[in-house]
Image: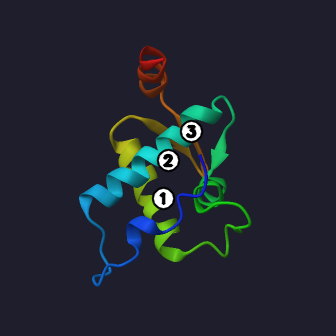
Amino acid sequence: MSGLNRETMQGRSDPGTTGADDATIEAAVLRQLLALYPVQMTVDELVRELAGEGSEAGGADFALRDAVERAVRELGAAGLLHRNGEVVVPSRAALRFDELLG
């Protein structure tokens, strides 16, 4: 999954995001991690993947990077991923859920 781009954050007059925007980013992050497992990804790699082709981690839009960082934090708090420094991997619970859904 790549090319999430900034659609969920464009066209808004306020700088914040809604819960639906956050949930969309969280789902995209978790889907990406599950799809590539057992490959371990860094947060920078996740940002590049979700930003789409041709994006550099350093040049990725701040709002997208912030959204991915928030998603990683929230998914970790929910027990769906583990973070060790910059590396993030899906938890056993997330892997089992993905397995059950087929």
* Three-letter code for the amino acid on which mark 1 is drawn: Val
* Three-letter code for the amino acid on which mark 3 is drawn: Leu
Residue 22 position in % (x across, y down):
34, 57
Label 2 secondary element: helix
Q: Earlier in the sequence, mark 3 or mark 1?
A: 3
Q: Indicate which disc residue 40 carries.
A: none
* Three-letter code for the amino acid on which mark 2 is drawn: Val
Q: Are marks 2 and 3 in contact (CB under 8 Å)?
A: yes
17 on left or right of 67: left
Determine the residue located farthest toward the bottom in the rendered image. Answer: 13
Residue at the image point whose x is 27% and y is 82% from the top? 14
Residue at the image point whose x is 39% and y is 44% from the top? 75
- What residue is shown with label 1? 68
Residue 5 position in % (x across, y down):
53, 65
- What is the spatial separation of the Cα atoms under label 3 and label 1, in whole angstroms? 12 Å
- What residue is shown with label 2? 29
Label 1 secondary element: helix
Residue 25 position in % (x across, y down):
42, 54
- What residue is shown with label 3? 33
45 on left or right of 63: right
89 on left or right of 55: left
Q: Are marks 2 and 1 in contact (CB under 8 Å)?
A: yes
Question: How many C-alpha atoms fall within 10 Å of the one at disc 1: few (<14), some, or many (≥20)?
Answer: many
- Above or below for 11 versus 69: below
